[in-house]
Each structure stands twice: as C-alpha cells, then as structure tokens.
Image (spheres, helix red, strand yellow):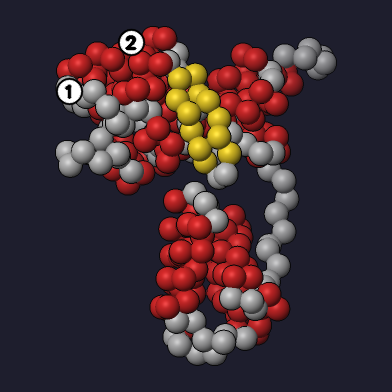
Amino acid sequence: MKLTDKKIIRFGEYLRNEERAEATSEKYVRDITAFGTWCGGEEITKSRVLEYKNHLTKSYAVSSVNSMLSALNCFFDFVGKSELKVKLLKVQKQIFTDKERELTKLEYERLLKAAKQKNNKRLYYLMQTICSTGIRVSELKNITCEAVRNGKATISCKGKTRVVILPKQLCKMLKGYMKENNLKRGSVFISRNGNPLDRSNIWSDMKKLCKSAGVSERKIFPHNLRHLFARTFYTVQKDVVRLADILGHSSVNTTRIYTMESGEIHRQQIQMLGLLRC
C-alpha cells in the first residue's frame, strides 16, 4: 500500500463523520501527513512502520510517540490494513503531575491581573469562563449570549451531550461584556471577523501575558485552565465521579489524570500524618 493525498483527505472526512473532536481530527491528519512525508512515497509495509516507530522513539517523548502511533493505527483500520498496526510503547503509570507545567491558582490570578492591565477584556473574561466551568477550549463556542442569559450551556462533544451550569457571578460579568460589545446572539468570544475563537487565537493571546504575569511559558496553554478547575473542584468536593460528569469524561480513569497532585504536595501531606519522630 502507498499513502496518497486522496487517502489522507478521505481519512479526515471519516474522522469528522465519526464526530471526533475537531482538534483530534486535525492532529490525526497532521500525524498521517508527517508519516507520508517520512515514507517518501515508498510502499508501506509492517517493517517500514516499525522503522518509523523506532524513529519516533528516538525523537519524541513516550506520550507523543503513542499519540502519533494511535493516529497511524486508526488510519490503518480505516484503509482496511489492520495488519500494519503496531503496539504502543508501555508507560509506567504516573501518579504525580509535573510541577513545572502545573498552573497554580496564584499564577492564574496573576494572568488575570496581567490581562486586565493590558485592557484585554476578552481574554480576561475568557480565561475565567474556562476556569470556572471546566469546559474544553473547543467547547467555548457553546458559551453563547443565549446560554449566558439562561445561566447554562448545552454542549455536544464526542457523541455526548451535557449541560454546563454557569456561575451567577460569571453570567453577570459576561452580560456586562456582551452589553459593552453589543453582542446579542451567538458565541460570546469571537474574533474581529465574528467567528468563534479557536485554540490558536487563545493560546497566542495567553502567551503574551507570560512576562508581565511572571508565569513560565510552559504553563501557559488554554487546557491548563481546565486542569486547574478539576484540581480545585476535587480538592473541595472529593467527588471524582461527579467531576467526571462535569468534565464530560466517559471514564473516571481519565478524570483521575486531572486530579493528580504534585510530588511536593504529596510530600507535605505525608509529613502532616505525624508518623515520624526525630
């Protein structure tokens, strides 16, 4: 089998028809395109795929390799070549978060302060919307003027529909923002052209706050706001099943990734047990 542009296009259409998340579909297509470039038009065999797996292993982190291999395996299923699929790399379960990438509540507040000082009201309210509801960045378009007036948003993602309750204080702030920008219907957070903001727009705006907020660039990405919501909710409620429903997760195991604490916090908690004597 040879990989062609036509097959990649059909694969992208298949992913959209399967109602995969837009970001996932785009990533899978990029991964398959990268694989095609690496193959250079040569015949795709199992040994060739294994060579590519070895190439990825030398160049990327395990999680990134497995993500790209998942895209390949999905593509091989799509074209009816399941015999070309390869096993993912085995990963030891991580029980602590990476402190260098974990956004703290204090850092979040500094980001809000920086956005306010730069008079970027759209970003100021956008970050609070994601962080106070736990929605995905791709779901931000569902925060509409109608949703704000109703105090809740209906979100359909990955074949599931859920209702997201909007805090009263958030609704009050967004109503003020809507009035100031003459927004009466459709998505609240839009570009100059009137289109809902996408992940790249938001990420770019957030990166501009790094220096003034004194927050590492490694911690500034929109999805980290969702993680902060999850950790904060779990710290207060200690209910991972309810949190899974709020986040729209099918599996509680996925939710547990969001509630992982840093190694330093775990160390402090152990010391507080009072089981050590000098």
Q: Quadrant of the N terminus?
A: bottom right
Q: Looking at the image, which is closer to me, 37 or 170?
A: 170
Q: Which residue is mark 1?
A: 181
Q: Which residue is mark 2?
A: 172
Mark 1 residue type: Asn
The x, y position of residue 196, in whole percent, is 30, 39
Regarding mark 1 in the picture, which secondary structure is present there?
Answer: loop
User: Which residue occupies 50% across, 90% down?
Assistant: 42
The x, y position of residue 165, in whole percent, is 49, 19
Circle 1 packing at 10 Å, graded few (<14), some (14-19), many (20+), is few
The x, y position of residue 164, in whole percent, is 50, 24
* Residue 57 falls left or right of residue 173: right
User: Which residue occupies 58% across, 39% down?
Assistant: 160
Q: Looking at the image, which is closer to me, 167 or 38?
A: 167
Callout 2–callout 1 Cβ contact below 8 Å: no
The x, y position of residue 265, in whole percent, is 63, 24
